[in-house]
Image (spheres, coloured by chain):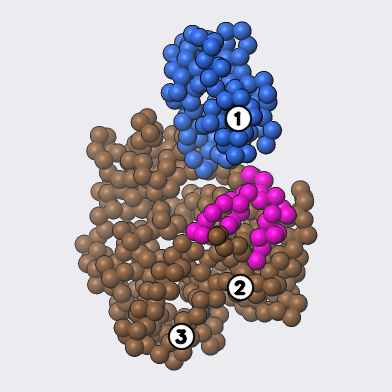
Chain colours: A brown, B blue
Amino acid sequence: MLKRTPLYEFHVACGAKMVDFAGWEMPILYRGIVEEHQQTRASGSLFDVSHMGRIYVGGPDAAAFLDKALTRNIRQQRVGQSRYSLVCNSAGGVLDDVIVSKNAEQWLIVCNASNRERIVKHLNGIRESGAFDAQIADQTESTAMVAVQGPAVVGLISEALDIDIQSMKRYSFENGTYRMSRFTLFRSGYTGEDGVEIIVSAGTARNMVQSLAGEMPGADSPIKPAGLGARDTLRLEAGMPLYGHELGEGIDPISAGLSWAVDLSKDFIGAEPLRVIAGRGPAKKRVGLELQGPRIARQGAAVKAGEVLVGAVSSGTFSPTLKRSIAMAFVDAAHAADGASVSVDLRGTTADAKIVALPFYKR
Amino acid sequence: MPVPQDRRYLKSHEWHQQIGDKVTIGITQTAADELTDITYVKLPAVGTKISAGAAFGEIESVKATSDLYSGVSGTVAAVNAELNANPGLVNADPFGKGWMIKVKVTDAGQMAKLLSADDYLKKTGH
């Protein structure tokens, strides 16, 4: 039996096509992936991301415990700040990428839906083996989370929720009240646009969404619902990694180009192997590819320099903004320079491609 | 999702419409909706011989790449060149302007082996 988010009825009423995503019944699209992508870049979109894990960590040792579990240095993090971080296994492979936020009394970790159970188990294991005095509470299913993204969003949501978002820094958050119910609003997202992500109680979610996107969003609504399909093409244009594609247990954060989220000077799980990789330089690098022609490179497609196999594609799409075929790939460091010519094998035919700097799209 | 009664179908969602000794092939609305925004259609050249049950082309969308199958054997007599510039025609009008190839069939009796509209709907659960 698939889980449903508190916004399930809203999706159905808006004509969503629902699919199984990590055990949740989620909207893949409402009107069309490309249309929803363009709506996000041009004005605004509302995404249900309630399937993502929301794990709260409290107690006297919460900071020391998270410092051990996370690659990011969280010691200087202030109340009201969020940070992107990775959770690694002892070999330095990535178990998940998360956003960690510091509240006055506790911390919040937002993790991927597909990794939630594994991350909760992993965190409990660290807490027990390190005898940390910390509590871990998975509140995913008692709350809802929406991402509202696009150039029109900050102005409209500031008014609707009576919060001055313009004065908030990126990766900061504030608490507010909507119809007697507390919510937390983060200035962050996964689309390459300005925007917010909001956590609210399950019972209040539908009312809030309807006051943000309209009772039944029409053709000229500035904010319309968008599905997981557009979320994927948007994050790809923005050069952001997706777990299962650019991240996984067989991939280390240094090769994935995420050294900035790894503090090698502190002691955390996976630190030692990552110091070795950073010291000698990663064997492979995550790069962007621009392909000639209309065809799309899918995960696993071989990347060649001349006749030599030098890497593999991790994600690809036809960019609705750039109107060309783009991909991310892991390529041998010696062949990963910007501007280098490579070719990609597309089910037996070859497309010429060029290595380019990420992101593909910047607002 | 309604499908036209004047054609025959494969479970893999291709429709076949016979006019004289030629059979036009395309994909159903269900298939187009499932693929979502179609970005590329790879079709054989006129004169190519194709076989029943074998792939004759490929179709790509932002979501996936799939093979296109023919239910009949014969020679490609015409190709919808408009799909090069506008592959979205397959989404907009899969049973009309989104047609893919016309095949001059070797044996018109092959059509009888394909699914009727009702059987297609039953087999694909739509």
Q: Nearer the viewer, mark 1 or mark 2?
A: 1
- The residue segment tinted magenta is A6-32
Residue A8, quarter of picture = bottom right
Q: Provide residue B79's location: percent of width, then percent of height.
A: 54, 17
Q: For the residues tagged 1 and 2, is the chain the same?
A: no
User: Looking at the picture, does residue A69 appear above or below residue A338?
Assistant: below
A47 or A321: nearer the viewer: A47
Q: Which residue is mark 1?
A: B119
Disc 1 residue type? Asp
Q: Is residue A307 magenta?
A: no
Disc 3 residue type? Gln
User: Looking at the picture, does residue B22 appear above or below residue B33?
Assistant: above
Q: Which residue is mark 2?
A: A143
**Image marks 3 and 2: residues in contact by CB distance under 8 Å:** no
Categorize mark 1 by other alpha carbons within 10 Å: few (<14), some (14-19), many (20+).
some
Q: Quadrant of the N terminus of chain A?
A: bottom right
